[in-house]
Amino acid sequence: MKLALMMEKIIMSSMELIKKLRETTGSGMLDCKKALAENNDDLDAAVKWLREKGILKAQKKQDRETNEGVISFYNHETSLNSFSLCKIKCETDFVAKNDDFLSFANQLTKSIHDSDNIKLQGNFDDISSISFNEKDLNTALTDLISKIGENIQIISYKKYHSDNSIFINYLHNKYNSSCSKIASVVEISTNDLKKASKIADELRVVAMQVSAMKPMGLNEESIDPKVLEDEKDIILKQIENTPDDKKEQIIKGKINKFIKENTLMGQTLITDPKKTVANYVSELSKANNLELNIISMDLYSI
């Protein structure tokens, strides 16, 4: 009887150690059990053992391709002129939907937003000094790779802030309220931030337009001249048997059509084919006695 009670206490003590080790490292039960066995139930030594094993596992996965992931936003639901985003990739769609992966993405993006000593945009190297959950970024990333079992890469980030513009964002194919596979941000300058913010829902269609139609630029001036030259060469080959006196007119018409179809301001509005995006924004501007000018756009996709 006494032996049975002693064995029960030992088992309970062992289970408590495993539980504590799992909570500390996020490792699986079998890994925690092995770590404790390898280190005579010394919790600190077991943590170190798991970290070392995790680093080795992570290093082995670093060359594997990452074709899935998320665009993660922070503060986008409460502010139209100050929020941040981060692009994080993994190997499979299954992990992209994983709660641990999404939680990491959300926490990292919040840390980026809250950090004042980093550049406004950059990549992993520019945020290597960031820490969260009492861990430096590299350790947190290594632990996540070890736990999830896939290569994970922090690709890029950007912090949005303006005193004279609002940023309209749109998340397509969302995994949660702040993470998606496709996202767009449109910056609209205005003379009245408060009034412009009140019509944010009406302006959101412009951000949806960017995600859906993927324009090359805002207008003709923002398209690379080489793109237009290449398009002109293609048109010339298509009409090589056309009389010379008609070629110039045909080229001009086709180039104008190409510009309209591939610029945000020239495109037909996805919710109303009778209007262009430029028409729509102009109508909203007049109806609300506001100055509204689209000055930039960003499209993110996995």
Image: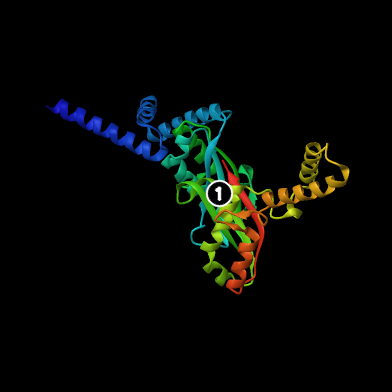
The kind of secondary structure element at disc 1 is strand
Q: Residue furthest front?
A: 243
- Residue occupied by mark 1: 183
Q: Residue furthest bottom?
A: 289
Residue 19, located in which quarter of the rendered image? top left
Residue 264, located in which quarter of the rendered image? bottom right
- Colouring style: rainbow
Residue 297 appears in view: yes
**Horizontal relation, residue 21 to residue 220: left or right:** left
Question: Eyeballing the image, is 158 above or below 67?
Answer: below
Q: Residue at x 74, y 54 (%)?
A: 220
Nearer to me, 267 or 60: 267
The C terminus, quarter of image:
top right
Q: Residue furthest left?
A: 1
User: Which x, y percent locates residue 77?
Assistant: 49, 58
User: Which x, y percent locates residue 62?
Assistant: 57, 30
Question: Eyeballing the image, is 244 above or below 110?
Answer: above
User: Which x, y percent locates residue 10?
Assistant: 24, 30
User: Which x, y percent locates residue 83?
Assistant: 55, 57
Type of residue at label 1?
Answer: Ala
The N terminus, quarter of image:
top left
Nearer to me, 264 or 297: 264
**Horizontal relation, residue 19 to residue 82: left or right:** left
Nearer to me, 151 or 47: 151
Q: Residue at x 47, y 44 (%)?
A: 104
Nearer to me, 291 or 230: 230
